[in-house]
Image (cartoon, rainbow, N blue to C red):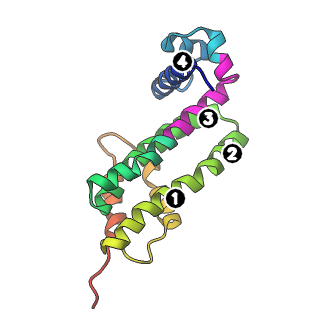
Amino acid sequence: MVRSDARENRARILAAAREAFGEDGDTSMNQVAQRAGVGAGTLYRNFPTREALVLAVYQDEVERIIGAVPGLLAKMQPLEALRHWTTDLVEAMRRKHGLGDALSPSAHQAITEQTYAPVIAAILLLLDAGKRDGSIREDADPGDFLQLTGALWRTASGPEDRSPRMLALILDGLRAQPHQ
């Protein structure tokens, strides 16, 4: 059983690292420790390498995004929940690509493989909810959807961000069509 202060330290470190890496991908471990208000020993006990910290930040972000699905479906229609969820996913993937420079190719591959199945499962929940209420076409596939949305996080963010328009096109393609 992990002590509550150890859990709090880990959470503070992850929050500080997420924020710091979002501002500057070259942030040092010591800068993260200072920002989190913990000593270097505490940081290294939790995350022995910078790569381990980057991987944990990314894993934590994926778990947060996946965990949001039931709440979104409780508050919104499936297509709208899918739009909100995908927008959040796109932002997380953009941050991940910023962190990618800090990862070795093998670590990058490992985290992608580790998170693929849970992300597909989350998409399946959203698509199945839409299939049940008739708003999403029956042949919608979570793998296809993830591959299509991969283009969204590669578009430029900011004033020229084309991802909302592109997402609207993807979602329009998912809509169930009335029987002819």
Marks 2 and 4, how far apart at CA: 26 Å
First to last magenta residue range: 44-62
Q: Which comes sooner in the sequence, label 3 or label 4?
A: 4
Query: Which of the two residues, 37 or 152, is positioned nearer the viewer here?
Result: 37
Q: Nearer the viewer, mark 3 or mark 1?
A: 1
| Tags 2 and 3 touching, CB below 8 Å | yes
- Residue 162 shows in the view: no
Residue placed under numbered mark 4 in the picture: 9
| Rendered location of residue 139, percent (x, y) | 45, 77
Residue 42 seen anywhere in this rendered image of the structure: yes
Q: Residue at x 37, y 66 (%)?
A: 129
Identify residue for label 1. Answer: 121
* Real-space CA distance between mark 2 and mark 1, rounded to the nearest whole angstrom: 18 Å
Residue to which mark 3 is pinned: 55
The answer to which of marks 2 and 1 sits earlier in the sequence is: 2
Mark 1 near mark 4, Cβ–Cβ under 8 Å? no
